Amino acid sequence: MKVGNRYYRSIWLSEDGWSVEIIDQTCLPHEFVICRLDSLEKAAHAISAMQVRGAPLIGATAAYGLCLALREDSSDEALDKAAAELLATRPTAVNLHWALERMKTALLPLPAAERVTKAYEVAAAICDEDAALNEAIGSHGLSLLQAAAARKRPGERLNILTHCNAGWLATVDWGTALAPIYKAHDLGIDLHVWVDETRPRNQGASLTAWELAGHSVPHSVIVDNAGGHLMQNGMVDLCIVGTDRTAANGDVCNKIGTYLKALAAHDNGIPFYIALPSPTIDWGMEKGVGHVPIEERAPEEVSHVRGLDRKGVLREVSLLPDGSQAANYAFDVTPAKYVTGLVTELGVCEASRNGLEGLFHSRAV
Ligand code: MRU
Protein backbone atom coordinates (compact mmCIF):
# COMPACT_ATOMS: atom_id res chain seq x y z
CA MET A 1 0.00 0.00 0.00
CA LYS A 2 1.03 3.58 -0.49
CA VAL A 3 2.76 5.54 2.27
CA GLY A 4 3.23 9.07 1.00
CA ASN A 5 4.34 8.62 -2.59
CA ARG A 6 5.88 5.17 -2.23
CA TYR A 7 4.41 1.68 -2.30
CA TYR A 8 5.41 -0.50 0.61
CA ARG A 9 4.81 -4.03 1.64
CA SER A 10 5.11 -4.75 5.35
CA ILE A 11 8.24 -6.88 4.74
CA TRP A 12 10.72 -6.98 1.87
CA LEU A 13 14.18 -8.17 0.95
CA SER A 14 16.90 -5.51 1.38
CA GLU A 15 18.98 -4.32 -1.53
CA ASP A 16 21.82 -6.56 -0.32
CA GLY A 17 19.61 -9.48 -1.41
CA TRP A 18 19.75 -11.41 1.88
CA SER A 19 18.68 -9.31 4.88
CA VAL A 20 15.07 -8.28 5.36
CA GLU A 21 13.41 -4.95 6.08
CA ILE A 22 10.25 -4.36 8.04
CA ILE A 23 8.21 -1.40 9.21
CA ASP A 24 8.65 -1.26 12.99
CA GLN A 25 4.98 -1.27 14.02
CA THR A 26 5.79 -0.41 17.63
CA CYS A 27 6.71 3.09 16.42
CA LEU A 28 3.47 3.76 14.53
CA PRO A 29 1.46 5.96 14.24
CA HIS A 30 3.90 8.63 15.37
CA GLU A 31 7.03 7.53 13.54
CA PHE A 32 7.59 5.54 10.34
CA VAL A 33 10.70 3.51 11.13
CA ILE A 34 12.20 0.86 8.89
CA CYS A 35 14.18 -1.84 10.63
CA ARG A 36 16.68 -4.26 9.09
CA LEU A 37 16.68 -7.87 10.23
CA ASP A 38 19.98 -9.64 9.56
CA SER A 39 19.89 -12.58 11.95
CA LEU A 40 17.58 -15.26 13.29
CA GLU A 41 17.67 -13.55 16.66
CA LYS A 42 16.51 -10.23 15.23
CA ALA A 43 13.70 -11.92 13.28
CA ALA A 44 12.53 -13.81 16.38
CA HIS A 45 12.73 -10.63 18.44
CA ALA A 46 10.76 -8.66 15.82
CA ILE A 47 7.91 -11.16 16.16
CA SER A 48 7.90 -11.51 19.95
CA ALA A 49 8.28 -7.74 20.55
CA MET A 50 5.54 -7.12 17.95
CA GLN A 51 7.61 -4.94 15.64
CA VAL A 52 5.77 -7.16 13.18
CA ARG A 53 2.42 -8.64 14.13
CA GLY A 54 -0.75 -9.91 12.52
CA ALA A 55 -1.05 -13.61 11.69
CA PRO A 56 0.08 -13.62 8.02
CA LEU A 57 2.99 -11.23 8.62
CA ILE A 58 4.22 -13.28 11.57
CA GLY A 59 4.38 -16.30 9.24
CA ALA A 60 6.20 -14.37 6.50
CA THR A 61 8.75 -12.99 8.98
CA ALA A 62 9.39 -16.45 10.41
CA ALA A 63 10.01 -17.77 6.89
CA TYR A 64 12.71 -15.13 6.38
CA GLY A 65 14.01 -15.81 9.89
CA LEU A 66 14.74 -19.37 8.77
CA CYS A 67 16.56 -18.03 5.68
CA LEU A 68 18.78 -15.91 7.93
CA ALA A 69 19.48 -18.88 10.23
CA LEU A 70 20.41 -21.15 7.31
CA ARG A 71 22.99 -18.66 6.05
CA GLU A 72 24.90 -19.38 9.26
CA ASP A 73 24.34 -23.14 9.35
CA SER A 74 22.16 -25.14 6.95
CA SER A 75 22.37 -28.52 8.73
CA ASP A 76 19.23 -30.46 9.74
CA GLU A 77 19.92 -29.69 13.40
CA ALA A 78 20.27 -25.95 12.78
CA LEU A 79 17.09 -25.90 10.72
CA ASP A 80 15.10 -27.68 13.42
CA LYS A 81 16.55 -25.49 16.17
CA ALA A 82 15.81 -22.24 14.30
CA ALA A 83 12.26 -23.37 13.47
CA ALA A 84 11.66 -24.23 17.14
CA GLU A 85 12.98 -20.84 18.24
CA LEU A 86 10.73 -19.01 15.79
CA LEU A 87 7.70 -21.14 16.67
CA ALA A 88 8.11 -20.24 20.35
CA THR A 89 7.78 -16.49 19.68
CA ARG A 90 3.97 -16.33 19.69
CA PRO A 91 1.53 -19.18 20.35
CA THR A 92 -1.83 -18.24 18.84
CA ALA A 93 -1.52 -17.44 15.12
CA VAL A 94 -1.40 -20.73 13.23
CA ASN A 95 0.20 -19.00 10.22
CA LEU A 96 3.51 -19.14 12.11
CA HIS A 97 3.36 -22.93 12.32
CA TRP A 98 2.08 -23.15 8.73
CA ALA A 99 4.92 -21.05 7.29
CA LEU A 100 7.62 -22.95 9.22
CA GLU A 101 6.20 -26.32 8.16
CA ARG A 102 6.08 -25.20 4.53
CA MET A 103 9.70 -24.11 4.72
CA LYS A 104 10.83 -27.33 6.41
CA THR A 105 8.94 -29.50 3.92
CA ALA A 106 10.69 -27.73 1.04
CA LEU A 107 14.14 -27.67 2.66
CA LEU A 108 14.69 -30.90 4.57
CA PRO A 109 14.83 -33.18 1.48
CA LEU A 110 17.57 -31.00 -0.08
CA PRO A 111 21.31 -31.33 0.48
CA ALA A 112 22.44 -28.68 3.00
CA ALA A 113 24.36 -26.76 0.31
CA GLU A 114 21.18 -26.08 -1.68
CA ARG A 115 19.02 -24.99 1.22
CA VAL A 116 19.77 -21.28 1.46
CA THR A 117 18.81 -20.50 -2.15
CA LYS A 118 15.65 -22.57 -1.85
CA ALA A 119 14.74 -20.99 1.49
CA TYR A 120 14.75 -17.49 -0.01
CA GLU A 121 12.65 -18.73 -2.94
CA VAL A 122 10.02 -20.23 -0.65
CA ALA A 123 9.96 -17.21 1.69
CA ALA A 124 9.44 -14.91 -1.30
CA ALA A 125 6.65 -17.17 -2.58
CA ILE A 126 4.94 -17.09 0.84
CA CYS A 127 5.00 -13.28 0.70
CA ASP A 128 3.79 -12.99 -2.90
CA GLU A 129 1.05 -15.53 -2.32
CA ASP A 130 -0.11 -13.76 0.82
CA ALA A 131 -0.51 -10.49 -1.08
CA ALA A 132 -2.46 -12.30 -3.83
CA LEU A 133 -4.70 -14.19 -1.36
CA ASN A 134 -5.57 -10.98 0.42
CA GLU A 135 -6.36 -9.19 -2.79
CA ALA A 136 -8.74 -12.03 -3.68
CA ILE A 137 -10.33 -11.75 -0.21
CA GLY A 138 -10.77 -8.07 -1.01
CA SER A 139 -12.70 -8.89 -4.17
CA HIS A 140 -15.00 -11.41 -2.47
CA GLY A 141 -15.57 -9.11 0.49
CA LEU A 142 -16.26 -6.24 -1.89
CA SER A 143 -19.37 -8.04 -3.16
CA LEU A 144 -20.67 -8.18 0.43
CA LEU A 145 -20.02 -4.48 0.94
CA GLN A 146 -21.64 -3.61 -2.40
CA ALA A 147 -24.74 -5.60 -1.43
CA ALA A 148 -24.86 -3.91 1.99
CA ALA A 149 -24.43 -0.47 0.39
CA ALA A 150 -27.26 -1.22 -2.03
CA ARG A 151 -29.58 -1.74 0.95
CA LYS A 152 -28.87 1.77 2.26
CA ARG A 153 -31.20 4.66 1.50
CA PRO A 154 -29.88 7.22 -1.00
CA GLY A 155 -27.44 9.57 0.70
CA GLU A 156 -26.80 7.21 3.63
CA ARG A 157 -23.27 5.92 4.10
CA LEU A 158 -22.32 2.37 4.90
CA ASN A 159 -21.02 1.94 8.45
CA ILE A 160 -18.57 -0.89 9.04
CA LEU A 161 -17.06 -1.88 12.38
CA THR A 162 -13.66 -3.55 12.68
CA HIS A 163 -11.50 -4.71 15.57
CA CYS A 164 -7.72 -4.75 16.00
CA ASN A 165 -5.66 -4.35 12.82
CA ALA A 166 -6.36 -6.72 9.97
CA GLY A 167 -5.01 -4.36 7.34
CA TRP A 168 -1.94 -4.41 5.12
CA LEU A 169 0.34 -4.00 8.13
CA ALA A 170 -0.93 -7.30 9.53
CA THR A 171 -0.27 -9.13 6.27
CA VAL A 172 2.31 -8.73 3.51
CA ASP A 173 -0.04 -6.45 1.58
CA TRP A 174 -3.76 -5.50 1.31
CA GLY A 175 -4.84 -6.93 4.66
CA THR A 176 -7.72 -9.30 5.22
CA ALA A 177 -10.65 -7.42 6.81
CA LEU A 178 -9.50 -4.09 5.38
CA ALA A 179 -8.93 -5.35 1.80
CA PRO A 180 -12.67 -5.21 0.90
CA ILE A 181 -12.90 -1.79 2.55
CA TYR A 182 -10.03 -0.43 0.44
CA LYS A 183 -11.61 -1.85 -2.70
CA ALA A 184 -15.06 -0.46 -1.88
CA HIS A 185 -13.64 2.96 -1.01
CA ASP A 186 -11.62 3.03 -4.24
CA LEU A 187 -14.83 2.28 -6.19
CA GLY A 188 -16.49 5.30 -4.63
CA ILE A 189 -18.81 3.51 -2.17
CA ASP A 190 -19.71 5.98 0.55
CA LEU A 191 -18.48 4.23 3.66
CA HIS A 192 -17.22 4.95 7.14
CA VAL A 193 -15.32 2.64 9.47
CA TRP A 194 -15.76 2.41 13.24
CA VAL A 195 -12.32 1.44 14.48
CA ASP A 196 -12.21 -0.29 17.88
CA GLU A 197 -9.17 1.10 19.68
CA THR A 198 -8.33 -2.49 20.73
CA ARG A 199 -6.77 -2.36 24.15
CA PRO A 200 -4.33 -3.16 25.51
CA ARG A 201 -1.91 -2.48 22.63
CA ASN A 202 -4.31 -0.29 20.67
CA GLN A 203 -3.69 -1.81 17.24
CA GLY A 204 -6.98 -0.23 16.09
CA ALA A 205 -6.16 3.29 17.27
CA SER A 206 -2.49 3.14 16.26
CA LEU A 207 -2.41 0.97 13.16
CA THR A 208 -5.86 0.63 11.58
CA ALA A 209 -6.52 4.35 11.96
CA TRP A 210 -3.08 5.11 10.49
CA GLU A 211 -3.75 2.84 7.52
CA LEU A 212 -7.24 4.22 6.86
CA ALA A 213 -6.05 7.82 7.20
CA GLY A 214 -3.25 7.08 4.73
CA HIS A 215 -5.82 5.78 2.25
CA SER A 216 -8.29 8.63 2.95
CA VAL A 217 -10.97 6.21 4.17
CA PRO A 218 -13.43 8.00 6.50
CA HIS A 219 -13.18 6.48 9.98
CA SER A 220 -13.67 7.16 13.68
CA VAL A 221 -11.77 5.50 16.50
CA ILE A 222 -14.06 4.33 19.31
CA VAL A 223 -13.37 2.82 22.71
CA ASP A 224 -13.69 -0.93 22.75
CA ASN A 225 -16.94 -0.83 24.69
CA ALA A 226 -18.78 1.49 22.28
CA GLY A 227 -19.66 -1.13 19.67
CA GLY A 228 -22.74 -2.51 21.45
CA HIS A 229 -24.25 0.94 21.80
CA LEU A 230 -23.62 1.77 18.14
CA MET A 231 -25.10 -1.52 17.00
CA GLN A 232 -28.23 -1.06 19.14
CA ASN A 233 -28.80 2.35 17.59
CA GLY A 234 -28.56 1.43 13.92
CA MET A 235 -25.10 2.90 13.50
CA VAL A 236 -23.36 -0.26 12.28
CA ASP A 237 -24.38 -2.08 9.08
CA LEU A 238 -21.74 -4.79 9.09
CA CYS A 239 -18.76 -5.99 11.12
CA ILE A 240 -15.65 -7.48 9.54
CA VAL A 241 -12.53 -8.62 11.39
CA GLY A 242 -9.52 -10.86 10.81
CA THR A 243 -8.44 -14.05 12.59
CA ASP A 244 -5.29 -15.66 13.92
CA ARG A 245 -6.59 -19.19 13.79
CA THR A 246 -9.87 -20.59 12.53
CA ALA A 247 -10.68 -24.14 13.61
CA ALA A 248 -12.08 -26.69 11.17
CA ASN A 249 -15.58 -26.19 12.63
CA GLY A 250 -15.49 -22.45 11.88
CA ASP A 251 -14.78 -21.23 15.44
CA VAL A 252 -12.67 -18.11 15.06
CA CYS A 253 -9.84 -16.94 17.28
CA ASN A 254 -8.98 -13.25 17.02
CA LYS A 255 -7.82 -10.34 19.14
CA ILE A 256 -9.37 -10.17 22.61
CA GLY A 257 -12.77 -8.50 22.48
CA THR A 258 -13.83 -9.94 19.13
CA TYR A 259 -16.20 -12.39 20.86
CA LEU A 260 -18.07 -9.59 22.66
CA LYS A 261 -18.53 -7.73 19.37
CA ALA A 262 -19.88 -10.88 17.76
CA LEU A 263 -22.38 -11.30 20.61
CA ALA A 264 -23.55 -7.71 20.25
CA ALA A 265 -23.83 -8.12 16.47
CA HIS A 266 -25.84 -11.32 16.91
CA ASP A 267 -28.20 -9.65 19.40
CA ASN A 268 -28.81 -6.81 16.95
CA GLY A 269 -29.08 -8.86 13.75
CA ILE A 270 -25.94 -7.31 12.26
CA PRO A 271 -23.78 -9.44 9.92
CA PHE A 272 -20.44 -10.43 11.46
CA TYR A 273 -17.87 -11.52 8.87
CA ILE A 274 -14.39 -12.92 9.32
CA ALA A 275 -11.82 -12.39 6.56
CA LEU A 276 -9.07 -15.00 6.32
CA PRO A 277 -6.54 -16.46 3.92
CA SER A 278 -6.47 -20.27 3.92
CA PRO A 279 -3.16 -20.56 5.85
CA THR A 280 -5.11 -19.28 8.87
CA ILE A 281 -7.32 -22.39 8.89
CA ASP A 282 -6.16 -25.01 11.38
CA TRP A 283 -7.57 -28.15 9.77
CA GLY A 284 -6.14 -30.27 12.56
CA MET A 285 -8.11 -28.44 15.25
CA GLU A 286 -11.64 -29.79 15.31
CA LYS A 287 -13.12 -27.06 17.57
CA GLY A 288 -11.73 -23.67 18.49
CA VAL A 289 -13.47 -22.87 21.77
CA GLY A 290 -11.33 -24.19 24.63
CA HIS A 291 -8.62 -25.46 22.28
CA VAL A 292 -6.78 -22.54 20.67
CA PRO A 293 -3.71 -21.64 22.76
CA ILE A 294 -4.43 -18.13 23.99
CA GLU A 295 -1.38 -15.91 24.35
CA GLU A 296 -0.95 -14.20 27.71
CA ARG A 297 1.27 -11.17 27.47
CA ALA A 298 2.99 -8.89 29.96
CA PRO A 299 0.59 -7.24 32.48
CA GLU A 300 2.31 -3.90 31.80
CA GLU A 301 0.49 -3.76 28.46
CA VAL A 302 -2.74 -3.45 30.49
CA SER A 303 -1.49 -1.40 33.40
CA HIS A 304 0.31 1.21 31.27
CA VAL A 305 -0.52 3.21 28.16
CA ARG A 306 1.92 4.85 25.80
CA GLY A 307 1.43 7.87 23.59
CA LEU A 308 2.44 11.41 22.76
CA ASP A 309 1.60 14.08 25.29
CA ARG A 310 0.28 17.47 24.20
CA LYS A 311 3.84 18.66 23.70
CA GLY A 312 4.60 15.77 21.35
CA VAL A 313 6.76 13.87 23.85
CA LEU A 314 6.34 10.09 23.90
CA ARG A 315 5.37 8.96 27.40
CA GLU A 316 4.28 5.78 29.11
CA VAL A 317 1.93 6.27 32.02
CA SER A 318 0.46 3.91 34.60
CA LEU A 319 -3.32 3.54 35.01
CA LEU A 320 -3.51 1.36 38.11
CA PRO A 321 -3.26 2.07 41.81
CA ASP A 322 -0.28 0.57 43.62
CA GLY A 323 -1.01 -3.01 44.59
CA SER A 324 -3.47 -3.82 41.77
CA GLN A 325 -2.61 -6.61 39.38
CA ALA A 326 -3.40 -6.82 35.68
CA ALA A 327 -4.07 -9.88 33.52
CA ASN A 328 -3.45 -9.76 29.80
CA TYR A 329 -5.23 -12.34 27.63
CA ALA A 330 -4.46 -11.38 24.05
CA PHE A 331 -7.05 -13.39 22.10
CA ASP A 332 -10.51 -14.92 22.41
CA VAL A 333 -12.53 -17.40 20.40
CA THR A 334 -15.85 -16.56 18.77
CA PRO A 335 -18.04 -19.65 18.32
CA ALA A 336 -18.94 -20.34 14.69
CA LYS A 337 -22.66 -19.84 15.42
CA TYR A 338 -22.06 -16.10 15.79
CA VAL A 339 -20.19 -15.77 12.49
CA THR A 340 -22.27 -14.83 9.45
CA GLY A 341 -19.64 -15.95 6.96
CA LEU A 342 -15.95 -16.58 6.33
CA VAL A 343 -14.52 -14.43 3.54
CA THR A 344 -11.64 -16.39 2.00
CA GLU A 345 -9.56 -16.13 -1.16
CA LEU A 346 -11.89 -18.66 -2.82
CA GLY A 347 -15.15 -17.00 -1.84
CA VAL A 348 -17.49 -16.62 1.12
CA CYS A 349 -18.64 -19.69 3.03
CA GLU A 350 -20.56 -20.67 6.13
CA ALA A 351 -18.46 -20.85 9.32
CA SER A 352 -18.60 -24.65 9.58
CA ARG A 353 -16.63 -27.70 8.51
CA ASN A 354 -19.08 -28.16 5.62
CA GLY A 355 -18.63 -24.58 4.55
CA LEU A 356 -14.83 -24.73 4.67
CA GLU A 357 -14.63 -28.14 3.02
CA GLY A 358 -16.95 -26.95 0.29
CA LEU A 359 -14.36 -24.35 -0.71
CA PHE A 360 -11.13 -26.15 0.14
CA HIS A 361 -11.91 -29.81 -0.75
CA SER A 362 -8.35 -31.01 -1.25
CA ARG A 363 -6.82 -29.26 1.75
CA ALA A 364 -9.16 -30.50 4.49
CA VAL A 365 -7.74 -33.37 6.59
O1 MRU B 1 -1.57 -9.40 18.52
P1 MRU B 1 -1.64 -9.07 17.07
O2 MRU B 1 -1.55 -7.62 16.77
O3 MRU B 1 -0.66 -9.90 16.26
O4 MRU B 1 -3.10 -9.54 16.65
C1 MRU B 1 -3.52 -9.43 15.32
C2 MRU B 1 -4.94 -9.78 15.13
O5 MRU B 1 -5.63 -10.17 16.04
C3 MRU B 1 -5.48 -9.70 13.74
O6 MRU B 1 -6.84 -9.43 13.75
C4 MRU B 1 -5.25 -11.06 13.06
O7 MRU B 1 -3.89 -11.41 13.08
C5 MRU B 1 -5.72 -11.08 11.67
S1 MRU B 1 -4.67 -10.10 10.66
C6 MRU B 1 -4.91 -10.31 9.08
Image (cartoon, rainbow, N blue to C red):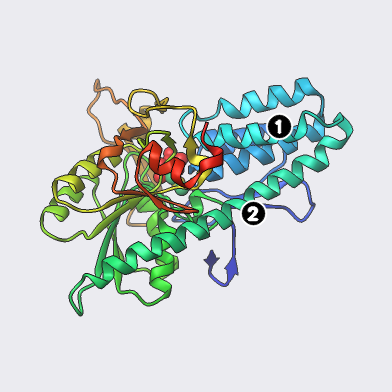
Which of the pair 196/266 is nearer the observer?
266
Disc 2 crowd rating (10 Å Cα; few below 14, some 14-19, many 20+) is: some
Q: Image height check: is 329 above or below 229? A: above
Residue placed at 44% from the left, 45% from the top? 358
Q: Does label 2 or label 1 sit earlier along the sequence?
A: 1
Residue 309 badge: none
Q: Is residue 74 left or right of residue 61?
A: right
Could you say where residue 153 lies in the image, as x and y percent from the top left? 17, 75
In percent of width and height, residue 113 lies at 89, 33
Question: Viewer-nearest of labels 2 and 1?
Answer: 1
Which residue corresponds to mark 2?
A: 128
What is the secondary structure assignment of the residue under circle 1? helix
Q: Amino acid at mark 2?
A: Asp
Residue lying at the far bottom of the rendered structure: 154
The residues tagged by marks 2 and 1 sit, at their Cα atoms, a distance apart of 19 Å
Q: Residues within 10 Å of mark 1 (few under 14, many from 20)?
A: few
Residue 250 is situated, as x and y percent measured from the top left of the image, at 37, 37
Q: Residue at x 64, y 33 (%)?
A: 100
- Left or right relative to 196: residue 62: right
Q: What residue do we see at 87% from left, 30% from top?
A: 111
- Ligand 1 sits in quadrant: top left
Residue carrying label 1: 105
Q: Nearer the viewer, residue 361 or 100?
A: 361
Q: Nearer the viewer, residue 148 or 310?
A: 148
Q: Is mark 1 within 8 Å of ligand 1?
A: no
Quarter of the view holding residue 230: bottom left
Q: x%, y% of residue 46? A: 58, 38
Query: Which amino acid lies under the numbered mark 1 shown in the image of this protein?
Result: Thr
Whether residue 257 is visible to the viewer of this picture, yes or no, is no
Which of the pair 311/225 is nearer the observer? 225
